[in-house]
Amino acid sequence: MWSRRESNLRPTNTNLEIANPNPVYLMSNRKKKKTPPKPSYNHTITKSYFDYYSRTVKKLLTLFKFESDLFDEFTKKQKMKMMEVRILPPKVSAKYNHCVPRQYINYVKKQVNFLLKENFGDESLKLTYEDYLTVGMNFITQVSRIKNEQGDNASEFVTEFAQLINELEEDISLVDGLLNFVQIQLFEVSKINIRIYGVDWGHEIESPKTFAGHIYITSTPPEVVSFTYHNKTRPAYRLAAGNLSGGDPIWFTVPHRSVVSGSNDERPLKIYVQNHALLRVKERLDTMMPFNRNAAIMTSLVENTMVKSSKGQMLFSFIDAKKQLLGYMPFIVEADSLFVLTFIPLSSPDAPEGNRLCKLLNITKDDMNFLGMDKLSFYQYTDFTAIPQLKTAIIQAGMWHLAEIEPEERIPSRPFVKSAGIIAKFFQQNAPELNKDDVLEEIEKMY
């Protein structure tokens, strides 16, 4: 179950101030230092650790539908031999020669630590992931060792338990589950136009009887291509997730028939996102955390839920982690590639919801952009109780959920206070003609 991976041990440099360069005199005038004793790698098995190990194994046996008292079938000498071997909680670090920011390493460490404290299996047993990864996997390894040593002479319990573990390893691996969890966390911090982060697994021998699993974070540079749209050459970045357990990153594709109406073509299309689209998502979803924006971009394109715009164009639905619709992403198809062009907020007249809203309020796209209605913060910072006409129209257009989304990040230049101000004046039906320069100046203060 564990593979040896030798550590690179380097001797410590000792800097000596040599008064006399003659080595003979140096040796004769100095007392010979005592050689420090070699460190002992034999763990002291304390009573508390013995009791903890025993409790954890009994929980494990209960989880696997065995009688917990079967652990007492082993002699004290066998138990002590099991406990001599220690498996440490997994460590997290960047893989050698891979560039990973320190804050991302710390982020993954924090998430892994949270996971290790959660219950594994039956919650009533209070067996944590950390218990299973350290004591549980150690016990499983030791039982397999005893079965191999005793062969047909092994007890009925040892034989049955070893057989069960063999069957479980064919179906599920806890390490695979842990790596999948880490990959999801990295899915959120990867930026396809900067760097894509993946995860690999390894083992390190801390000492002859101490082992540690190691979660290595990998990084891959983006794949960028140029394409031509409206006679202008533009850069686009390929959609991908980081590698899992070695190998290459996961490059996402979408079937041609899924994105082109009436097509029966099954060939996969590579997905590329124009840099302009990434900037527009950042600008329009201005109160969403960067991690969640990145995850939403990838999830939306991989799930490829499509709608038709008011002009008949097919669009990707842009959804967040709670499956709430936030906008759309138009695209074009060229040869074996799909290029996402931009991000359209729900308020855009090109979106079905925005088209309805413009008709209900009798306003234009310029009016909406002028008021800031193309930004998520507009719906979170506006006091709609003071503007019932606007609230009713937003509800009828199917956009009210935007006002119910809590801001994840604050706008530094604006305190989080819901207000109406000049927006209410704009929507007063019988309001006198407003000076646009005055209105613009007041709105600029708000944003």
Image (spheres, rainbow, N blue to C red):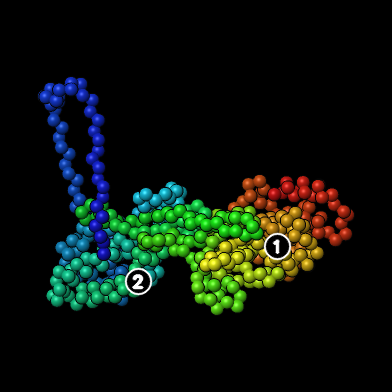
Question: Which mark, by number, is residue 172?
Answer: 2
Give the crowd class for mark 2: few <14, some 14-19, many >=20 residues within 10 Å.
few
Which residue sits furthest front? 231
Q: Are marks 2 and 1 in contact (CB under 8 Å)?
A: no
Give the crowd class for mark 1: few <14, some 14-19, many >=20 residues within 10 Å.
many
Residue found 46% across the figure and 56% down from its top: 196
Where is residue 7 shown, x and y percent of the image?
26, 50
**Is residue 375 visible in the rendered structure shown here?**
yes
Helix, strand or loop at label 1? It is loop
The answer to whether 345 appears left or right of 299 in the picture is right
- Image-quadrant location for residue 338: bottom right
**Is residue 182 visible in the rendered structure shown here?**
no
Where is residue 350 shown, x and y percent of the image?
70, 65
Residue found 26% across the figure and 64% down from its top: 1
Which residue is at the front of the view, 381 or 370? Answer: 370
The answer to whether 213 appears left or right of 422 in the picture is left
- Residue 411, placed above or below residue 15: below
Which residue is at the front of the view, 310 or 255? Answer: 255
Where is residue 260 shown, x and y percent of the image?
59, 73
Task: Name which residue type carries label 1.
Answer: Ser
Which residue is at the front of the view, 370 or 258? Answer: 258
- Residue 21, placed above or below residue 346: above
Where is residue 110 shown, x and y percent of the image?
43, 54
Residue found 13% across the figure and 75% down from its top: 153
The answer to whether 294 appears left or right of 162 in the picture is right
Question: Which mark, by number, is residue 253?
Answer: none
Badge 2 or badge 1: first in the primary sequence = 2
Residue found 15% across the figure and 63% down from its top: 77
Task: Name which residue type carries label 2.
Answer: Ile
The residue pinned by badge 1 equals: 348
Helix, strand or loop at label 2? It is loop
The answer to whether 403 appears left or right of 17 in the picture is right
